[in-house]
Amino acid sequence: MANHKISLAFADDHIMLRKGLIKLILLYDCYESLFDVDNGNQVIEELRKHKIPDILVLDVNMADKDGIETAEWVSTHYPQIKILALSMSSDETTIIKMIQAGAKGYITKNSDPEKLKEAIDSLYEKGFYLPESLSGKIFKGIRNNLSAINEIPVTLNEKERTFLHLICKGLSYQEIAEKMFLSPRTIDDYSKKLCKKLNVKNKSGLIVYAMNHALN
């Protein structure tokens, strides 16, 4: 890390907080800021200008293209970027949604400033970051989803089982489409139909179902 500055980008619609975080983290000379923006659409614009950071610090709640939508887009188109989710919320549903959307780390805005450096370094060096105070909430959220799944027997065909297996591997819909030799639109249709068939609400529910039925 001594020979390479970790490049960062920041997306948060609270400009005072965003600028404060940047000023704080740049006190360390091992980091550089490529860009900082207000929303997810601006993140996409900057990335398309070939400004590709090592780590994107991404606010969960933004008015124009929120963190979940942005994380899904970034992880699909630029999977090499490690996403650190930033939020006021520490509830398990938000954490799970951001992780399933592609975030590799999660930190709350009321954390000590030193935790931001710890999170960035951990993401860069290990590929993930989740403080111990939040890790238990993920397992709680999974248990809650399991209890909510309708256990009426469901018959799955081979392609549906393959899709559920691949989604548990953390692959994007684009990557699943390539592995199954199908179009991304078809994979998106699979997801919607399976949500209805299995009585779950979203991608996280599909993953929980697959894990509970040993399809992962």
Image: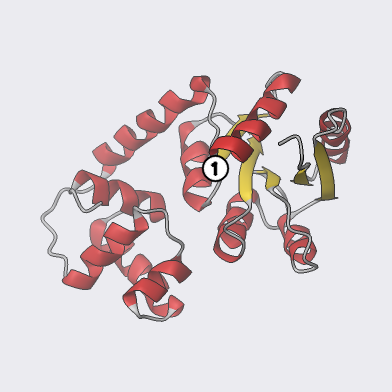
**Which scheme is used to colour this image of the protein?**
secondary structure
Give the residue displayed 68% in from the left and 46% down from the top.
55
Give the residue displayed 42% in from the left and 71% down from the top.
188
Residue 164 placed where, x, y %? 28, 60
**Residue 161, image quadrant:** bottom left
The answer to whether 29 appears left or right of 205 in the picture is right
All told, the count of numbered labels is 1
The answer to whether 47 appears left or right of 149 in the picture is right
Secondary structure found at label 1: loop
Residue 137 visible from this viewpoint = yes
Asked if 23 appears above or below 10 in the picture, the reply is above
Residue 206 placed where, x, y %? 32, 54
Asked if 161 appears above or below 145 in the picture, the reply is below
> What amino acid is labelled 1 in the image?
Lys
Label 1 sits on residue = 104
Give the residue displayed 55% in from the left and 63% down from the top.
76
Residue 88 visible from this viewpoint = no
Give the residue displayed 38% in from the left and 78% down from the top.
186
Residue 211 placed where, x, y %? 25, 46
Compare residues 137 and 114 and report the one nearer the observer: 114
- Mark 1: few, some, or many residues within 10 Å (few <14, many ≥20)? many
Compare residues 43 and 55 and report the one nearer the observer: 55
Asked if 209 appears above or below 147 in the picture, the reply is below
Residue 1 placed where, x, y %? 71, 36
The answer to whether 211 appears left or right of 37 in the picture is left
